[in-house]
Image (cartoon, helix red, strand yellow):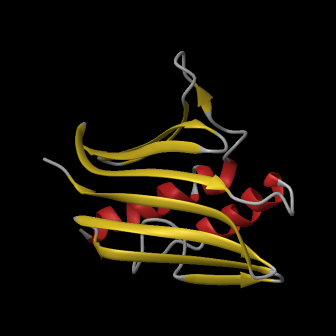
């Protein structure tokens, strides 16, 4: 499981957190997709829309689905631009860690921005919610859930 968590963290740091909203492949059905591969693991993040958006991350081990996370999110307020919100979100997602390898850290603050991520469960079965506040006003939210698959 340690190898998987290390891979998942690398995959997340090297896909949306690095090049989201400009590095995706656009599929025939309109989905945007990011991929990362290392050794026997393959990560695919496929999502629809931009605000609101829904998506799914799948990790394959030896070409078989191993782990899945579904998510949906949206911006709530237009007191700042969506590009600023997503830029801050990418900073947070780059801070993903082994204790909470689903999205960003439990909490992160930069200037007037505050990111919070609450998770229940473990890598095999979990759910959670992340939010971003700006000047103490909630401006973004995302819900996610997933776990191991056979």
The image shows a total of numbered marks equal to 0
Q: Is residue 4 left or right of residue 138?
A: left
Please provide percent x and percent y for residue 136.
Answer: 75, 82
Q: In the orientation shown, which residue stands out farthest toward the right? A: 80
The image quarter containing residue 7 is bottom left
In this rendering, the answer to whether 112 lies above or below 37 is below
Q: Is residue 131 left or right of residue 57?
A: right
Q: Is residue 76 left or right of residue 47?
A: right
The image quarter containing residue 131 is bottom right
What residue is drawn where x is 62% and y is 35%? 24
**Most foreground residue, 28 or 1:** 28
**Most foreground residue, 65 or 131:** 131
- Judge whether residue 94 can be spotted in this image: no
Q: In the orientation shown, which residue stands out farthest toward the left? A: 150
- Judge whether residue 66 can be spotted in this image: yes
What residue is drawn where x is 74% and y is 66%? 88
Please provide percent x and percent y for residue 64.
Answer: 21, 39
The image quarter containing residue 122 is bottom left
What residue is drawn where x is 59% and y is 66%? 93
Q: Quadrant of the N terminus?
A: bottom left
What residue is drawn where x is 35% and y is 59%? 145
**Most foreground residue, 91 or 5:** 91
In this rendering, the answer to whether 147 lies above or below 65 is below
In this rendering, the answer to whether 93 lies above or below 49 is below
Please provide percent x and percent y for residue 70.
Answer: 39, 50
Please provide percent x and percent y for residue 114.
Answer: 70, 80
């Amino acid at each position: 499981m340690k190898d998987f968590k290390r891979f998942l963290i690398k995959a997340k740091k090297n896909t949306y957190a690095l090049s989201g909203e400009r590095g995706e492949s656009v599929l025939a059905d309109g989905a945007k997709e990011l991929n990362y591969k290392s050794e026997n693991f393959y990560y695919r993040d496929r999502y629809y829309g931009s605000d609101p958006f829904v998506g799914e991350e799948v990790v394959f081990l030896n070409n078989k689905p191993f782990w899945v996370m579904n998510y949906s999110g949206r911006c709530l307020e237009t007191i700042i631009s969506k590009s600023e919100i997503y830029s801050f979100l990418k900073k947070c997602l780059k801070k993903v860690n082994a204790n909470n390898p689903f999205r960003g850290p439990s909490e992160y603050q930069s200037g007037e921005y505050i990111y919070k991520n609450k998770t229940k469960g473990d890598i095999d079965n979990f759910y959670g919610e992340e939010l971003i506040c700006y000047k103490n006003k909630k401006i973004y939210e995302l819900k996610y859930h997933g776990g191991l698959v056979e």
